[in-house]
Amino acid sequence: MIEILNASQLSRARDTGALVADILATLRGRVAPGTNLLDIDRWTKEMITEAGALSCYVDYAPSFGRGPFGHYICTGVNDAVLHGRPHDYTLANGDLLSLDLAVSLRGLAADSAISFIVGDARPQESVRLISTTERALASGIAAARPGGRTGDISHAIGTVLGEAGYPVNTEFGGHGIGSTMHQDPHIANTGRPGRGYPLRPGLMLALEPWIMADTADLVFDADGWTLRSATGCRTAHSEHTIAITEDGVEVLTLPRQAR
């Protein structure tokens, strides 16, 4: 399913995007060495509930997962890059943490992810991984414009990732989003410009470049959800929900103070 939002729906999606961004910003400010992943999940539940929103994850049960996800946020640590299921793990100084959050508010969903280093350590490999996904995300957003195609976005993202020397996995990537979290079209993290679905005003997309330091291969964790790098290398993930407009593109998952 591909949805094209009208002006009223886009206005509601802005509220959802701001909520997602503000929750992630709050979590980033709270997380420190000694924080448990289950605390992060609990804080997320509290903020979603207080806002009158709904989690897109807690009952999520796609074909690739093992039953309902059962938690409110994805927490990936170090080699865990996607769908990280919160568990009893206490974060240490220097851990690379990825937080991926999707919620629905008044019938519209928004999805965003951030990666950052816990504490005051700054491992150079981790800094570079995070910076590369952020630059790739910015490049993908810049390539999104009415009249273009999804392949333009994929090519822009893939160019940044490839030039940085990272392997690119195309099994998971960006996606359409609207009244539900995951919709068509799929936005691979590499591709050919001028190909793919047309970018029309009202189309909402979640763009999410993610990388692993030295491999493109994933392995499932024993929890049936968490996807880790096959070599145990570190990983990073950045994501924004955007809307194609008549004039260009609007990023919906920016914190309110950044708008």
Image: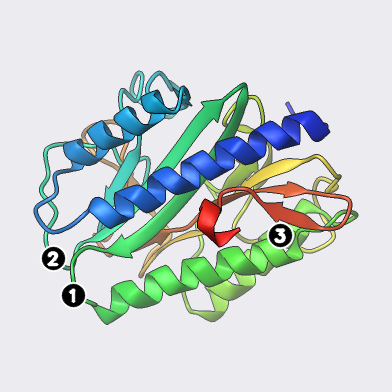
Disc sitting over residue 190 in the figure = none
Q: Toward the viewer: 107 or 115?
A: 107
Q: How dense is the environment of label 3, judged by Cα within 10 Å: few (below 14), some, or many (20 and up)?
A: many
Q: Residue furthest front?
A: 257
Instruction: Look at the image and tell me in which quarter the C terminus lies.
Output: bottom right
Q: Position of residue 66 (x, y in %)?
A: 33, 23
Above or below, comparing residue 165 to residue 73 in the picture: below
The secondary structure type at the circle numbered 3 is helix
* Residue that label 2 marks: 93
The first of marks 3 and 2 along the sequence is 2
Task: State the scheme by which the image is colored.
Answer: rainbow
Q: Toward the viewer: 194 or 36?
A: 36
Tell which tag, 3 or 2, sits nearer the viewer: 2
* Residue that label 3 marks: 153
Tell which tag, 1 or 3, sits nearer the viewer: 1
Q: What residue is at 31 percent from the left and 48 percent from the top?
A: 27
Q: Rounded to the nearest whole Å, what is the CA distance between mark 1 and mark 3?
A: 33 Å
Query: Is residue 155 in sight in this rendering?
Result: no
Q: Rounded to the nearest whole Å, what is the CA distance between mark 3 and mark 2?
A: 35 Å
* Residue that label 1 marks: 121
Q: Toward the viewer: 154 or 131?
A: 131
Q: Toward the viewer: 89 or 82?
A: 89
- As drawn, is 78 to the left or to the right of 47? left
The first of marks 2 and 1 along the sequence is 2
The secondary structure type at the circle numbered 2 is loop
